[in-house]
Image: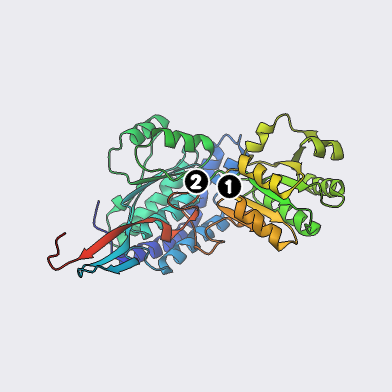
Amino acid sequence: MSQILPIEKRNAVLSRMAALLEQERTAIKAINQQDLTNYSGDDLAMEKRLLVDDTKIDGMILSLQQLASQEDPVGQVRFNFTHDNGLKISNKTAAFGTILIIYESRPDVTVEAGGIAFKSGNKILLKGGKESLLSNLKIVGLWHQALKDNDVATSWVEYLNYDRTETQAFLENPTQKVDLIVPRGGENLINFVKKHATCPVIVSGRGNNFVYVNAEADIEKAIAIIINGKTSNISVCNALDKVLIDTNLPNWEIFAKQIIRELQLFNVTVLGDDSVAKATGVQQIESDLIWYEEFLDYKIVIGTTNSDQEAIEKINKYCGGHSASIITKNDAVAQEFMENVDTAAVYHNASTRFTDGGQLGLGGELAISTDKLHQRGPIGLQHLVTNKWYIYGEGQIR
C-alpha cells in the first residue's frame, strides 16, 4: 500500500471529482440509460436504485463537496497518557489500508462510498453489480481522471469487474491485501460475502423495520409516519415493513381500518395477523415467518400486541436490527421502548426513513451497519478508521 496521502491531496481529488461529475452529467445519464435498457426489470427496488438522474448526480456532487470540507479523520488523538516512568503514550486514528465495497445496482455508491473510503486514507476496491456495469465504469473513469489531474496513482480507486465465480475466488484468496469488506445489498449478497471472506466484514443494509403504535399514540402522527416510512422510497433499507398496534389504543380497529385505507391509496398490499384480518378484512398472513422478511416492495404487515413489553419482545425477535419507532404521547413509555429495543436506531414519533448518514449529521455514509462491531448504524467518515498507539520514550525498559 502506498503511503497515506496528505489531506490537501485527498481533498483536491474529491473537489476535482465533484467538478468532473458536473462536467460529465449528460454523458453519465446517457450511459446509465443503457444500463436501464439492458436491465430485465423484474425487481422494482433494484431498478429504482439503478437509475441515475439529475437529483442523484446532485447528491453525488454534494457528498463529495461535504467530504472535502470535513476534518481529516486520520491522526485524531483519542487518548493521552503519561506513564509513571515518563513514557508519553497516545492513541490516534489510522487508516485501515484497503477496503473492498461489494454492492448491487447503485452507481451513486461508486461515488459516495469511494469518496468516504478515500478521504479516510484508504485504498478502495469497488465491486458493483453487473446491472450497473456501464455506469460504474464511467464513474470510475472519472475517479481515475481526478486522481491523475492531482498526480496521484489511479490504483487508489480500483474497479473489480468480476463475475460471481471470480468474486468468490478473490474473497477466498485475495490477489492483494484487503483489510475490510463492506457488502451493501440484500441478504443473499451479505451471506455470500460472510461465507467466503477471509478478512473482517461489516454487515450492512438489511432493514425489516417496525413502527409500534402505543395506546397513547397521536393518531394523525402515526398515520403520517407509517405512510412516509412505507411509501416514500420502497427500495431503501430504512423503509418500513411492519406495524404493531397496541390493542389498548381506544378504537384500535377503527385506526387499523383508517391506516389500511390510506396505504391502499398508494397501492400498498396490506396483510394482517389474525386479529387485524378479522377486524378489517385484509388478507391474513400465512405464517409468522413473514415477520422476519424485508420486502423492498409496496407491501406491509400490520399486527396487534397487548402491551409495550410484548411489542418490544416481538420487534427484538423479528426485526433486522436496523430501525424501530414508537408513536406515543408518553415520554416515559417511549424512553423504556428506546432503551430496550435492540436496533441500531430507535425513534420516538418519527419516521424510520431518517436512518441515513446525511440525515443524522454525518455528511454521508459508506453503509449502515446492523453489526455491533466496530460501528453500528450509519458508517460515516469518522468511523472508517482503526487506531494505533504511539509511545515516546527516552530509553525506558520494563
Amino acid type for the residue under numbered disc 2: Ser
Label 2 SS: loop
Q: Tell me residue 196's x, y (percent).
A: 39, 33
Q: Is residue 309 above or below residue 17?
A: above
Q: Tell me residue 146's x, y (percent).
A: 35, 59
| Front one among 134 and 229 | 229
Instruction: Identify the mark at residue 204; answer none if there is no mark.
Output: 2
For this orientation, the residue located farthest to the left is 395
Q: Number of marks in the image?
A: 2
Q: Is residue 61 above or below residue 161?
A: below
Disc 1 to disc 2, C-alpha distance: 9 Å
- Residue at label 1? 237
Amino acid type for the residue under numbered disc 1: Cys
**Residue 350 appears in the figure:** no
Residue 54 falls left or right of residue 5: right
Label 1 environment density (alpha carbons within 10 Å; few <14, some 14–19, many ≥20): many
Q: Is residue 90 above or below residue 234?
A: below
Q: How is the image coloured?
A: rainbow
| Front one among 16 and 78 | 78
Label 1 SS: loop
| Front one among 43 and 277 | 277
Q: Which residue is rendered at x = 37% and y = 54% of the image? A: 143
Q: Name the image quarter holding the C terminus.
A: bottom left
Q: Tell me residue 348's x, y (percent).
A: 67, 59
**Residue 121 appears in the figure:** yes
